[in-house]
Image: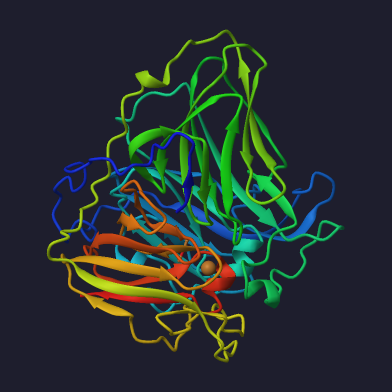
Amino acid sequence: MAILTRRNLLKASAVAGVYGVGLGVAGRFNRAEAAPEPRLLKTQTIQANITGTEMTRDVMTYGSDGMPPVLRLRQGEPFAARLINGLAEPTTIHWHGLRLPNAMDGVPFLTQPYVYTDEIFDYAFTPPDAGTFWYHPHCNTLVQMGHGMTGVIVVDNPKDPQFDAEIVVNLRDWRLGGDGQFIAQYRPRDTAKAGTYGTVRSANWQLEPHYDAPAGGLVRLRLAITDVTRIYSFKVEGGEATVIAIDGNPVPKRFPLDVLQLGPGQRLELAIRMPDSEGAMVSIEDIHGTNPTVLTKLRAVGSSLKRNVGDLAPLAFNPVQKADLGSAEHIPVILSASAENATADSICGSLGYNFWAINKVPWSGDKPDRTAPMAELKLGKSYVFDMENLTPHSHPIHLHGMSFTVLSSTTGAVQPFVSDTYLIQPNEKVQLGFVADNLGDWLLHCHIIEHQETGMTSYLRVV
Ligand code: C2O
Ligand code: CU
């Protein structure tokens, strides 16, 4: 990922020993738990007021209250959800960034059957990591996500430091015409480039919402990019913002936010020190491209709490094992364009084009005729992805089921971030290290969903 900073804070810092808290290799993800009462997640089609003026029809969501609910889980405690499919087409739920047993991963054909109209599917797992994650379908993904089915997950660690407020923001666009109704989700000529952008931008399904927060207080701001296409460059004006976590994992070393670029699927946690004077505004902006946009604003209320970001104790690192670089096997991951023909031959998968490929194989995933895995990995062994982007576009590459550590990049010094999604730049080469500590077939794909569905998808098999 490209991190632009005036303050030159991105020197790889010495973090030996902070990873790999020493849980066992296998078993941890697969132990049977007494399942709690399931959270009901009924998918349905509703009308919603996104534009502020007219009702948009054919919005797809979980539940009936507009935006999919923010799900709150607890680290290390069993969670259960029952998907009830009220859509007129099949769906599944993928829990993005959560390390869970393969059968709970929500990928049609690879890990579970389609959940057809009026069918149910029970998910149950125990999240090993605390942080900000999200959930979405993995079937007809461009349309289902594009029409609304993207929700945020917060996994709490009760031992986290105390903030004065917490605000969760689901960031995404909508492809709506002037009448507020959906237009085609993609244009093939854009799919073959950076992807098709939305026409209406939103934060928590609203246009530039404002939230109150205590003056002089510390706010934990959780931002999730759940859009199907858009890359954001975050900037904060009017308050002091410190990056505390990226993609569900505390950063190795906190740093003040200058500008930070993140792609679809990624999450950013900021500690915001609110201004002291009542009524002062902090604005969260995306300055990517030519049209800087205010996403949301926080308004200082009450008399100043006079807090200091330096007083915040660090967040605990998640129990992600660190790859043993001495013994690690290297796996090439080459991202390129493709010109092979494709057919739209399943309900969930391809758009009917192949524009992209991983290791020269274009595959759209989510369909019965699976290709061979790109690599077969041994449980408990260490691996390094040698990933290279031969295309002129950026791609947020997402790995299911396991978290990796960023080791090095040709773009310069990187912090050893732990993540599930890496935004690789044109011509960049990056090394991502991980331990294959989760059994099963795990997707690796671009999270620009049009790229995913036109070939930039593959999978690993851990045996
Ligand atoms: Cu966020 Cu394969 O997905
Ligand atoms: Cu891509």
Q: Is residue 107 left or right of residue 69?
A: left
Q: In this rendering, is residue 33 above or below 312?
A: below
Q: Is residue 65 left or right of residue 165?
A: right
Q: Is residue 31 left or right of residue 133?
A: left
Colour scheme:
rainbow
Q: Residue at x 55, y 85 (%)?
A: 346
Of 9 and 131, which appears nearest the observer? 9
Residue 61 percent across, percent down from the top left: 62, 57
**Looking at the figure, which quarter contains the C terminus?**
bottom left
Q: Residue at x 66, y 48 (%)?
A: 66
The answer to whether residue 460 is visible is yes
Q: Is residue 222 left or right of residue 161?
A: right
Q: How many marks?
A: 0
Residue 377 percent across, percent down from the top left: 22, 74
The picture quadrant where one finds residue 185 is: bottom right
Residue 409 percent across, percent down from the top left: 36, 57
**Looking at the figure, which quarter contains the N terminus?**
bottom left
The answer to whether residue 112 is visible is no
Of 185 and 6, which appears nearest the observer? 6
Q: Residue furthest top?
A: 303
